[in-house]
Image (cartoon, rainbow, N blue to C red):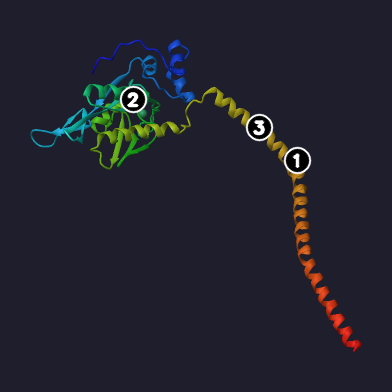
Amino acid sequence: MYEERTTLWIPKTDLGREVFEGKILSIDEIFETGRKIKEPQIVDKLLPNLKSDVIFIGGSPGKGGGIKRTPTKRTARMHRSGRRYNIVALVVIGNGDGYFGVGKGESSEHREAIRKATENAKLNIIPIKRGCGSWECACSEKHSLPFRIEGSEGSVKVVLKPAPKGIGLCINDEAKKAMRLAGIADIWCKSFGNTGTRSNYIIAIFNAFKEMNRMKIPGEAMPEEEKEEKKTKKKKAETKKEIIPEETIEEAPKENKKKTKKKKAKKQVPEEAIAPEAEAESEEEIAEENIENSEAGE
Ligand SMILES: [Zn+2]
């Protein structure tokens, strides 16, 4: 859509330097460690065949009524000399094979807004888990979603469902752009709320994908480190099971002792509490005896 500025990249962050020097060769390494990408050039280098598309979020009155959709939205603020305009753009980015991002940009110029949005989209890029969660299809290819997902932004709520092969993208035209860039071929969608606000609509879809990344898929291949961790945990659990009866035997009397101690303590407390009363009673008794004695003496 536009020509990127071809300036030399001088990395500013540690992650950027590692990518620049060739220590990190795939973007999955970054996602696994959970580091934040703060330079768009990192994504450019690791995913060279990225494509971007502008979502038509704006609108102007058309000739025959209705709204003519435009790629940028113009917002106005009042100034003492009249209206000042800001241009907002929403860009989706992806390689068509499992990586997808959305970004928003704002500026006083169209071109600049789209450039900013594209950079933000690169920084927001996430991996998309794909699969075939449709019972009608039940293949193991990555043409749809592994299960039903939900996402929301503003008033818009989106439910995305896996569809069998050949269904295509049963979704809004703007969202089709996003699905193509994410690499999803078949999908069913249900949406609620004001989907006319397309920026919220697309971001809701993005949020659904984000939510999916937090879930773990049962059939997914685990990294070797996690497998080893699980093995060690199992071993630990087994050893614990063996020890458990001894511990219970050892612990049981301890608990009893503690209880008895507590009981003793409880017993002691009332005794102490009673003691002064008893003394008082005895004093009274003594006093009474004295009175009686004195009466007897008289
Ligand atoms: Zn399938």
- Residue 72 picture location, percent across and down: 21, 28
State if disc 2 and disc 3 touch (CB < 8 Å).
no
The local secondary structure at tag 3 comes to helix
Per the model, the C-alpha gap separating discs 2 and 1 is 59 Å
Measure the C-alpha gap from mark 3 to mark 2: 45 Å
Q: CA distance from mark 1 to mark 3?
A: 16 Å
Report which residue position mark 1 lands on: 246
Tag in front: 3 or 2: 2
Say whether disc 1 or disc 3 marks the residue closer to the N-terminus: 3
Q: Residue shown at 31%/32% (left/top)?
A: 187
Dot 3 surroundings within 10 Å: few (below 14), some, or many (20 or more)? few
* 1 and 3 marks in contact (CB < 8 Å): no
Say what amino acid the circle numbered 3 marks: Lys
Quarter of the image for residue 283 reads: bottom right
Q: Which residue is mark 2?
A: 120
Q: Residues within 10 Å of mark 2 (few under 14, many from 20)?
A: many
Circle 3 residue: 236
